[in-house]
Image: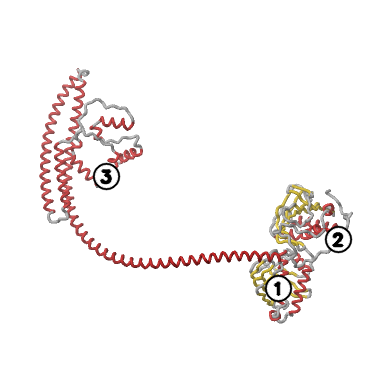
Amino acid sequence: MSSHRRMLRFHLRHPDRILLPRADDCLRSPQWLVERCNEHWSLSLEAAAEPASEYPAQDADLLPRYFVEQILANVPEVRDLEQELAASVQGLEDPNLPAACSDESLDLFQAFQALLDRQNEIRQLHDDGAGLRELLATQETESKQRLTASNARLAQMEKEKATLTKERDEAMNRAKSQQQRIDALSKAKAESDQRLTKAETELRALETEHADIREENELLLLQLHQVQEELESIFLNAQSVTTAHAAEKDEFTKRLAASDSRLAQKESQLQALQEENTLLSQQLHQVQEELERYFHMHQEARQAFETVNGRWLRVLQRNRLYCDADRIDILPASEHDGRALAWRMHSLSIAGRFIDRFDVSTLTHDEGMTLIIGRDSPQGVPLKRWSVVADTAELHLSVGLRASVDSLLDLAPSDWMLVHGILRLMGETLAEPDAQARIPNHVSLEDLGNAVSAFAAGMTSLPAVLRYEDIRLKREQINADYEHLWIRLDDLEYRGLRWSGFEFRLSCADVRPEVFGTHPKLEFPESAEPSPLDQWFKESSDDFGPKLEVRFALPDAIDIDVLSRLETGDRSFIAALIERLPSMLACLERSGVDLTRSWDDWRSLVSNIQSIWDRQVAFNPDWQEAPETPETPSAPPLADASSTQTPEPAPAAERDAAHTREPNANVLRFWT
């Protein structure tokens, strides 16, 4: 069976390379096989001009073949393979070829076919019950009679076989004598030789056929016994099946009734659910309409909020001194010092910032008052940039103590405005009618109010300093004889003017091994942003573009030509920048910036710049600036990033009215 499967698989995969005819058809008609080959592969073959041999009557034994087919029909694998082969095989369709079938086998097959017809009738009469056994006995008797007749015919065939055997012996004797003649007359008797060979072939075929008939007869008897046993078992099974079918029918009737009852119940439930779904669908549409209406209302409210919020932000930008708090609580800050008070401001809005809760303490003393701001707050660090002067857990701010003043001067612009706003809120709180009731009894309301007012007045009298919100190192340049730190300041403020950003380079030229800081420089590259240097000009260029340089050289040389071309305001800004350089380096170092050169070398370079500037410019009467305007909390016109115009400086004649001078002859001119 495996060989047949492989043959069929190969035929299905390569139908153009294989022809699958039946062997019986090929033996019956060789001419048909040749024609099929010529047609399938486009050949020009011709059949041999030989007389057609009588095809062995293989189809004559129909009864044994039928039993074999009935047995194999119960094997699914064989049945499927036979069906596939029958669908793929190419059969002979020649009506002129007679069917080779012996009369004896045909009669035997017809007798057995009648037996099968009777068997089918028995199977059809299984349900009738009463006459089944009698009919089966009658059919069995008839089958035995026919079997007896078949045996008689087999005996007759045996006799015929003996006759044929005798004839075969005689034919063999004649063949021997003819063979002797053929040996002598081989060329003349070629046709007789062919006939003899054909006769021998036919004799061998008859012997083979006789042996097959004997085996088939034995198999037929065995199969008849098996058929009888199967018929009896089928009858018994039919009775049991009938009984089981009746029981199953009763059970099915009961289940059907129960199913009908459940179906009616489910239909009622389904109707209730459909009504509920209809109601829910209506409610869902109503909710969806309400949601759409609320969504449009939300969009309108959001647009209105954005409009109001933008207007509010513009108001805060124009009025940076605005400050407000929902509630201010005043409590004793220490059990040991009654002069210390804790101020807790809720929902503080100040300097464009909103703080949910802001805690600050005040401590009054002989020198005035000190503001104490804690670094560790539940809401985080309250200041935008913690002062590097007081790198501790608490920041102490005072106008009467030198260390506290330095911390005030080091505040970022927004933190500076925050302190102003806090003092303002403190003063307004102490001016309220119930102020005395809100502070501890041992604290004098008048003394506390005077201390707050004095602190605020002291802040307005402090000198103007350069303030910035953030600082970062843009790049560190290291060449063989030159190094610089490119620094950027964000949200810069000086003397009431503000800029979104400012960049400069702290550099050193003439760098040699073990020599650094002898020729420091301040470089101001060209920028597209508004610049604090009104009179910036292209003094030189490098790989980064045009720049303005202020050069220094140890021990006390400075580039007078560049300074003389700058106005007073620009020189004042450079002086404020130089003053803040140590604090800037400290901020960068504290933020974790890692440099190739040590921070001490850069601090030493900044110290040299400050020393030269103090000697040649700051303390030189010929280069003295006009008295500095103290810092006030007012908000003059600003030059922030949102403005496209650079703030116009005051007229040069007005700024330099008291500064008509010539450059100091003692200051060296170099790098011309």
Picture coordinates of residue 306, whole percent (x, y): 61, 64
Q: Are marks 2 and 3 in contact (CB under 8 Å)?
A: no
Kind of residue at badge 1: Leu
Badge 2 crowding class, 10 Å Cα cut-off, few under 14, some 14 to 19, many 20 or more, is: few
Disc ID at residue 657: 2
Q: Secondary structure at mark 3?
A: helix
> Which residue position is annotated with label 1?
425
In whole angstroms, how far apart are the C-alphas of marks 3 and 1? 104 Å
Badge 1 crowding class, 10 Å Cα cut-off, few under 14, some 14 to 19, many 20 or more, is: some
587 horizontally vs 610: left or right? left
> Which residue position is annotated with label 3?
79
Residue, x 89% and y 54% (percent of image)? 665
Residue mark closest to the camera, 2 vs 1: 2
For the N terminus, the image quarter is top left
Q: Secondary structure at mark 2?
A: loop
Q: Quadrant of residue 158?
A: top left
